[in-house]
Every structure is written in structure tokens, then in C-alpha cells.
Image (cartoon, rainbow, N blue to C red):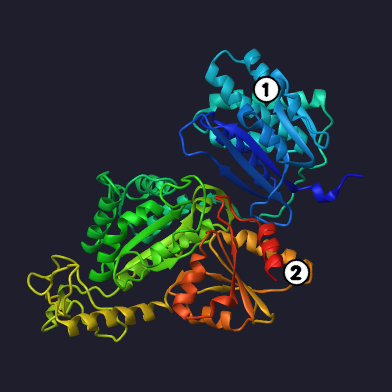
Amino acid sequence: MSDRSKVNNFVVRFANVNGTGSASANLLFAKAIFRMGIFVTPKNIFPSNIQGLPTWYDVRVSEKGYLGRRAGVDLMVCVNPQSMKNDVNSVKPGGYFLYDSTKGINPEYIREDINYIGVPLMEMCIREYQDARQRQLFKNIIYVGALSALLNIEMEVLADLLAEQFQGKEKLIAPNIKALEMGRQYIFDHYEYPLDIRLERRDLVGDSIMLDGNSACGLGAIYAGATVASWYPITPSTSVVEAFTDYAKKYRVDPVSGKNLFAIVQAEDELAAVGMAIGANWNGSRAFTATSGPGVSLMSEFLGLAYFAEIPLVLIDVQRSGPSTGMPTRTQQSDIIASAYASHGDTKHALVFPSTPTECFEMTAEAFELAEFFQTPIIMLTDLDLGMNDHVCAPLKWDDSKQMNRGKVLNAEDLDKIERWGRYLDIDGDGVPYRTYPGTHPTKGSYFTRGTSRDEFATYTEDSDAYVRNMQRLELKWDTMKNRVPAPEFYQDKNENEYGLIFFGTSIYAAKEAIDMLADEGKHFDAMRLRSFPFHESVNEFIAAHKKVYLIEQNRDAQMKTLLVNEFQVNPQNIISVLNYDGMPITADHIVNTIKSKA
């Protein structure tokens, strides 16, 4: 009798060479599993050069719907001799190692506790194809075909996916189907199939979709009404603006004249990019930029200007491993402090922390609303894992009746009713002044926007009292913001346990699985997911309600803990850090083991 625990519950890793076209074949494999109604999590692990170095692609299959990375490989598909030694060693005892047997395998790579599946991929391609590029590309499809037999992937699903992929290029469908069949037939002729690790069709995913966070951010900006994106390319945020550009070409073109109703500006550097976005927002557009950690460092002075001059800005920071260049194609949550306090002087920036592509879409749209109402930068902190990998998530929804809230904007009629308009006056007692767009009124709408001290009427001054009044009003605005930014999410109706667990961003996947693993051992935790900064008072209340809280974050220096301690003045000893900073997404096993070691 087969082991039912291995059905729809395993990890496959592909070891390829970067630049060989393997990514589309590996994604085909992951999507096929999703189409069979089974939860799947793909992770692309790639080098920072263009091609030639090893790359890996992990696919976790989970009957229970766990979407975080899991350590250990059950089936390794290795077509890269450069990494073969390490790839063999990464397979769990009893697991499988599929390799290109055209030239055999080095005896040093033989382990007695794993199973080897040799498929002569290159030999089959040389025999079938004349073109060198075709041989390389179809080799990837052949191993997907072999896996379809070994793991029981439905051929009809693969055929449908290829038909969708090559819509408009139908002549490419048949050769790909043939390559799949070649791989399947080789398994049929030489091995027992399916393996004990295998797939069975389910109906688990419902109406879920597969989407990457960067595409979701780009689409969220479209729905928010953004018309300007200024940017400088940097991994891993480049595809945010690329996605926005693609969507804008579809949804931001005048149907009558054919003219673009959007502007995409690739600047000469990050400083220029953020400066252009600030200028466009000041002039009345909804504009944004996207970057990663090194870009945030360069943008800090302009961020201080936008904070002090009170100009809306949306900045999407797709975090990667630092400092300096660091590991540009690895993930981390390491820009928290840099973003929260970017710029010199007393400066604080609102942050939002999406956990899923669905939230990337929703929070990007919400960020524009917050930026314009509070007239300040809103920085959305995603990361490489969320931004560049496909995730199973809830479908995107939008209320078509929703109207943009541009905040406290005065038109010419409003200005005519005011004897003397003060750009930085606090009329409503919430710290948020009224603004207007340049050119709105011939006389009353004019004012200076500067990074130097001014009074309530935007007149330059170095008077100490005026400066203090302004800084106190900015602090009041910050307090007002606490109840307008996304609230934390709690995983219990009321606090019931002695210990709490706090997490944010993509740590959600491993954290939720870890909570279940700990509960199975009789260890129960209350849990809270942070979704924004400034922190809501309920965050402080959650910490105070527990003897100790464990805070999960993916950086070395416990940056979120630093932020909590600094803002709430809580006892640092009451917050126990669970840290991961190796550039790979954190796992539930790591969380559980760390909590046990610090209990």
C-alpha cells in the first residue's frame, strides 16, 4: 500500500543553467499542478548575472494549503553539471534524483539512500532536433513530460496550458506536445510509474489565481488612477513599472485619438526618478516610483523634501538582501528602518506591508489615497519573494463605483471664498492642511514649496516658534494617520494564551504553518500580523497582553523590533526575535526550532 502522506505533499527542485529557457518550462510544471486543483508554491532562485550560472526553481506541493518554502527536496531534476554535487546532497533520504543520463553520472555522486532516474535528455534532443537553440529549449519540455508520467500530471492540463501560452503562435503547440510525449514515453518504457510521491486531482484552490506581486502592484496603480511612473531599473523592482506600462498601454489610451494618457519616464538614476515623481504629484498627477534598498538610500533626501514640503508620493520598495549591492537576487525584509526614517532630521514615513499579491493590488491602490489625503510619502515594502514569484492568492476585486479621494484640495471657487489661504494652516485640527494644484487660481493659489522652514502661509522664515509649530503639526498628522493606515490582522477573537506571535509581509506563509505545527505539539500562541506603520494602538495592546511575544522578521538586526521598541517604549526583553537573513524565504521549521530554542 502506498504512503498517502506523500500524495500532493512534496517538494520538487529544478537545477538549471541561467539563460537556457528553463523558467517557462518550470512554470508550466507548477501551473499544471495548480490547474489540477492542488496548492502549489514556486520559488525562482536565480543569480544576478544574465546567463551561465546555476539557477534553481523550487516547487512545493501541499494538500493542506501551506504556501511557504519548505526545506528538503523530495525530487531533484538536475540538468546542470556545475551544481550536481550539491544537488545530489540536497535530496532527502528516500527521495529521487532525475538527471540527464546522456553522459552518465559521476560515481562520486551516487548515494545509496536515494533513487536515480536517468533520462538521456540531450541524446533525445540531438536525435530529434537540428537547431542548437531548439535542442536546449525542448530539453526542458522533455523533462516536464517525464515528470508528468512520474508524478501523474494530467496530459490534458499540460496541453491546455501550452495552447494558452502559444495563442497566436499555434504552430509552436505541436512541437511542444511532441516533446512532452517523448519524455512521458521514455518513463513508460524504462521505469515504474507513478512514483510514491505523486499527484491526485483535487478541488482545493477554489477561485484562487496565480500571480506575482510586482504585476499586482502595477495593476493596483492603474486602478488607483496613476498616470505617471518615473523609475530607474533595479532588481527586483523593475517588473513593477514594466507591468504598469503594459497595463497602461491597454487601459490608459484615449479610444478616439489613440494618444497615451500616461507617461513612463526612465530616469538617469534613482534620485531623478523620485524627484520626477514628486514633481508630478505636486502638479496634480498621481505618480509613483519603484525601487529596492539601494534606491531608497539614494532617494532619502528627496523623501525628506516630500515629507517636509508635504507632497504626496507612492514608493514601492521591493526589498532584497543588502547592505550595498548585497545579494541582489535574494529576498529579505531589511529596508524597514531605512524607509521609516529616511532622510535626516525628525522624519517619519508611513509604511505598508502587503503579504500576498492580492494585498499588493489593494494596498497599492490604497497607498495613493493615503498619500494624497496626508500629503506625504507612502512607502510600500514588499520583497523579492513576493514581487517576483508567483503565488496562489485570492482573486482581485474592485468596486467600480469607488471614486478617487484626492484629499484636501481646494479649487478656484474654494479659494475665492477664503480671504487669505494658508497652505500650512491646520484648519481641521488633524494636522493635515489644505492644498491646491498649481495654476488653479491666478492669485490665491500661488505659494512656495520649499525644503526650508516656513510659516503657516508658506512664507520663508527661520523663526524658532514657527518651526516648532510646523513640526508639532506634522507630529499631529502622524497621530491622525495611525487610524487610517491598514489595521493589523489578528488570528483570534481575543487573546487567550500566555505567548504571542507577530509577523508581517511574506513571513505570513511560514508563520501560519508554524502556528499549526506548534499547536500539534500542544503549544498555542495568539498571533498578529502587522500591516502598516505608524502602528495602531492595538499593536501595543497585543504586546502588553502577553508575557512574551515572538517577532518573526527576515533580517539580521531585528529592525521591526527596533521600530516597535522605539515607538512604544516597550521592554525589549519582552520581544524575542525569530530571524532569518540567508536570502531565502523563511521556513516554518526554522520558526518552530527557533522558538523552541529560546523558550
Q: Is residue 364 visible?
A: yes
Which residue is drawn at the image coordinates 70% and 65% (left, top)? 597
Quadrant of res 154? top right
Neighbor class of circle 1 (other Cα within 10 Å; few <14, some 14-19, many 20+) is many
Provide residue 227's location: percent of width, then percent of height.
Answer: 30, 54
x and y percent of residue 202 in the render? 74, 50
Q: Quadrant of the C terminus?
A: bottom right
Side (left or right) of 493 relative to 104: left
Residue picked out by circle 1: 121
How far, Cα to Cα, is label 1 from label 2? 45 Å
Q: Residue furthest left?
A: 443
Q: 101 or 581: which is nearer to us?
A: 581
Residue at (21, 61) in percent of width and height? 283
Image coordinates of residue 554 in percent, x first then y, are: 55, 59
**Residue that protrudes farthest toward the right in the picture:** 1
Element under label 1?
Answer: helix
Q: Residues within 10 Å of mark 2 (few under 14, many from 20)?
A: few
Horizontal relation, residue 426 to residue 49: left or right: left
What amino acid is at disc 1?
A: Leu
Residue 110 in picture, x, y percent from top left: 77, 30
Q: Nearer the viewer, residue 511 or 414?
A: 511
Asked whether the viewer can see residue 403, the reply is no
Q: Residue at x 74, y 63 (%)?
A: 517
Q: State which tag comes first along the sequence, 1 or 2.
A: 1
Looking at the rendered structure, the secondary structure element under dot 2 is helix
Q: Is residue 4 left or right of residue 560?
A: right
Query: Which part of the image, by quadrant, shows the N terminus?
Result: top right
Circle 2 residue: 519
**Where is 57 relative to 372, above or below?**
above
- Left or right of 170, for residue 484: left
| Residue nearest the viewer, comparing 17 with 169 | 17
